[in-house]
Image: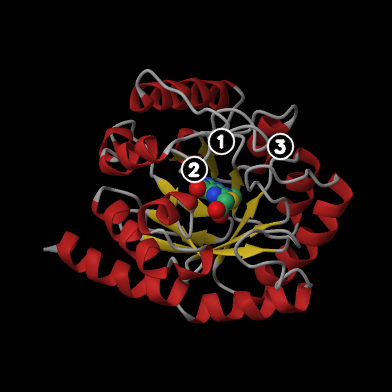
Amino acid sequence: MKFASNEIDLSRVHVMGVLNVTPDSFSDGGRFSEASDALEQADRMVKAGATFIDVGGESTRPGATPISLQEEMDRVLPVVEVLAKRYDAVVSVDSSSPDLLKEAVGLGMGLINDVRALQRAGAMEVAAESNLPVCLMHMQGSPQSMQDAPSYQNAISEISHFFEQRVDACLSMGISRENILLDPGFGFGKTLTHNLMLLKNLKAFESLGFPLLVGLSRKSMLGQITDKEVDERLASSLSSAAIAAMNGAKIIRVHDVEETVDVIKVVQAVLDI
Ligand code: 8Y7
């Protein structure tokens, strides 16, 4: 798949490093809110072997207060520009805002990572115009309310149905089939049981024919299982990365890039035999 100037072989498993440029992001506590701190963090992730760096300025943590578009643009765009100039890694942008995404195209963004699956007015048009790959993530509800009472008759089939609908909408807007990735959205309107079922049955989504991206790193489902705080979830994050990669995920979105790269090397070696 071609991400701006970068051709990435998605028959193999890749690591995406999370770069939060949001002051209230739950796991970094805002330590990387300053652009220069963000750049140091990005530097470490690239050197540790991240294929993608996912830059985000809006916290989608359950219950987080929405920020203004101007604030999101001020945080994200300068970082995207510098990273795209400085590194070979693909610069992914975690945003649902069409105006921001439009600006980011010209600054070297390589992937649109939209947790709202291009459902905001104008977002699909920007994605189509950009010719860039887009990750369509499933979420039940909105970040404000999604963890109130997640409910499914059958999570796998409902999420698959959502994917089919969003893919059809994208294709009819002129987004190319070759530019679509899917993500079941761990923790986005899902109970622990839903999340575990999705992780165990990830291959069901693989059969839709699009590469899978997943994010499990430090998420509350891991805290529920291990009874550990967010800064004590490295081992559980790594085990979830290994399971996801064994079950077909091609891009694993994580905070701890160096450790996850080792895990993925082991999984890839097994997959290659
Ligand atoms: C995901 C994500 C977040 C995810 C994709 C967190 C932006 C919450 N999670 N994007 N973003 N998939 N594609 O805990 O699971 O990192 S934010």
- Residue at 77%, 72% in the rendered image: 35
Q: Is residue 175 above or below residue 63?
A: above
Residue receiving disc 2: 187
Which of the marked residues, 1 or 2, is nearer the chain's N terminus? 1
- Residue at 63%, 43% in the rendered image: 62
Q: Nearer the viewer, mark 1 or mark 3?
A: 1
Which of the marked residues, 3 or 2, is nearer the chain's N terminus? 3
Residue receiving disc 1: 147
Q: Amino acid at mark 3?
A: Val
Q: Amino acid at mark 2?
A: Gly
| Residue closest to the far left | 273
Q: How many marks?
A: 3
Q: Nearer the viewer, mark 3 or mark 2?
A: 2
| Residue closest to the far right | 70
Residue receiving disc 3: 126
Q: Is residue 73 left or right of residue 30?
A: right
Q: Secondary structure at mark 1?
A: loop
Judging depth in this view, the residue of 93 and 170 nearest the camera is: 93
Locate residue 39: give its quadrant. Answer: bottom right
Q: Is residue 119 above or below residue 263?
A: above
The x and y percentages for residue 45 are: 53, 75
Q: Is residue 41 above or below residue 5?
A: below
Q: Is residue 258 above or below residue 104?
A: below
Judging depth in this view, the residue of 164 and 131 nearest the camera is: 164
Spatial CA span between label 1 and label 2: 8 Å
Q: Is mark 1 within 8 Å of ligand 1?
A: no
